[in-house]
Image (cartoon, helix red, strand yellow):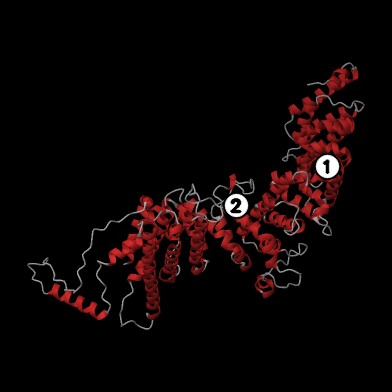
Amino acid sequence: MANIEEYELYGDAKYRSYVTAVDKALKYFECTSDWADLISALGKLNKVLQSHQRFQLIPRHITVSKRLAQCMHPALPSGVHLRALETYELIFRNVGSQRLAQDLYLYSAGLFPLLAYAAMNVRPALLALYESYLLPLGEQLRPGLNGFLAGVLPGLEEGSDYYQRTDTLLLNVCIAVEKSYFYGCLWKCVLCNPGIRLQALTFVVSHYNRKLSMEDQLYIIGTDIDSMVQALCAALQDSSVLVQRSALELLLLGFPLHNCQLVFEDRARICTAAVIVLLRRDMSLNRRLFAWLFGSDGSTTASGVSSSEAASPSSEPGSPDPTGVSTSAYFYAHASSLLLEALRNLFSQKPSELHVVPVLSGSFSIFWPYRILISLMDRQEITTVILDDILIDVFRSLYHECNQGSLVHSQQEKQNDRPHFELVKTANLLFSSLEPTYLWGYVAKGFREACKQAHAQPDRVSPQQLVAQVGSGTPSLTELCTLSEFLLDVISLETYVETPTEHLPDLLHSISQELVTYCGSLAPVELEHALSLCSRLLCKVQPSIATTVDDSSLSAQQAPSQTAADDASSVIVRCMQSFQQLYVQFVSFWLLSEPAQTVAQFDTVLLKKRMTAFVRETELRRLLESVATKEPSDPYRSIDLPKVSRKMVKVSGMKLELLQGFGQMHSAYASLCRMLVELS
């Protein structure tokens, strides 16, 4: 559509002849059959432009720009590209800077992509065109700067003949358009264009002044911090190791954790993307990542923090270090909270719905968090700090993922539900790297803390979800019991022989002790879940207890296992005593309104227990002999019980007064009774 200026020029006969000549030259493009025809057509168009240089307005400029873009096709030879560049130069010279800035969106479509695939003899001509006509535009280049950077950065290849010239061009453009705006567009290109990430990050790292901090070079962050953070996250998850390495280099140089210009949320997003490099198992990436987390010198990324240094005594928090602060202390002070938040982001069921969008790429796998945590566990300085805090979220994530469908048990079901089977397998790989003493001790510790929390909050409200989402903090007692029962189903207890014979009985005893202590502070539903957990634990322990036989013919090789079984039996005996105490506590707190008076009444009518083992054995032997001598024809005849001389007590009618709230405790009371029966 012609504008007002073009309408005015139509009054000039020479301009009308100019339009006619351009139309005629454009006709030749419609009749081309090979690249030689394109060169001829471009030559005719160039002659028309040269003979009418007095006019700044190019007739049919939209059609001309389309024809020139077609001549920049990658499949065409360099001769066509060079002739088209001559046409661009004639047009830019004729229209002047002001009009070029207005029409740059038309000519950039064919011009900007050329450098990525241009032949070596084409590149100097293209760079000269940029230097002569686009660079003088200054701030007028801003609207097309994203496309310009996407077109020029591919030429920034280290070792190429035109690396220095391209780098100088970018520096001059950076100054011309203002540094903050330049880097803001650069980060947008990194985010949206994977093909130029390596060159863009190389440019940023090479021009970062290592003698100054990021605070003195804030223009590198650009005009939009969120775009820069997202670009770094995208680069850290790039498919190229070189891109990931450059991104980690930039983190070491410009964003050390002890002096970072970013808020906690942005640093957590970057850390979430950064730990994903552990999946590559690349030593150069791991070295840079751990150097960033442990605060080593960013200018010497080749050193990092070695395992020997981490294991040395000087690496422990609070101990002296040649650099003034130990690596473990640095990690605890600056990186531990970020790493915890990053792992919680990874273990969340729906990372796309978190505030870290778009940190995680579309190829995110539910197996990643477990494999990343396994890799982190190779560093003792990390696991000693974060494991206690992240393990409960690992349990929550696994629970939610497995309960999206039903848990599978049979081999056929495992084959039909392969993803969940593989997830449980990967999780077991993580759990097997933990000492069983720590794992089940962690559950016991969590149960104790949950009981204390319940005791400290008598007016607490029951959670809406049985198992909270990842990152919900300290679990409630019902949640911990649910997760513990779930772990008994998914964790392979056969990995360590001592688990069912030592650790699970110890856990059962620990839980029973806590229930005795906090029986009166727990809600009915909490007691019911806790007793259900105890029942499940006992089911896992009982097969080992059942094998405890008193056989004097045990060999020396069998003695250790028999000793372990005896220890487990003694723990079960202590559990029995604890549950008997729990029963008394339960009756006192939740069942009887006057427990002391009721017990006193029962004591008057109960038979006294035989005090000596000899008396018990004598009566048992007589009962067995009596059964053995019965006639086969009368197997059900009553057995004469031993006469016990006792003082006959006349008991008046008893009346048990139950508490009003006992109706809520029926299920818990039934579970407790079942536990006593099972333990007996």
Specify the label residue 345 is tagged with.
Answer: 2
Q: Position of residue 112 (x, y in %)?
A: 78, 40
Q: Position of residue 11 (x, y in %)?
A: 89, 16
Residue labelled with disc 1? 126
Q: How many marks?
A: 2
SS for callout 2: helix
The answer to whether one can see residue 97 in this image is: yes
Residues 521 and 366: in front is 521
Specify the label residue 679 is tagged with.
Answer: none
How far, Cα to Cα, is label 1 from label 2? 46 Å
For image coordinates 42% across by 50% down, the residue present is: 406
Residue 154, above or below 528: above
Residues 102 and 51: in front is 102
Residues 423 and 63: in front is 423
For image coordinates 52% across by 62% down, the residue present is: 430
Q: Amino acid at mark 1?
A: Leu
Q: Position of residue 120 (x, y in %)?
A: 80, 47
Q: Identify the image quadrant of residue 249.
A: bottom right
Toward the left, the furthest residue is 633
Q: Position of residue 174 (x, y in %)?
A: 84, 45
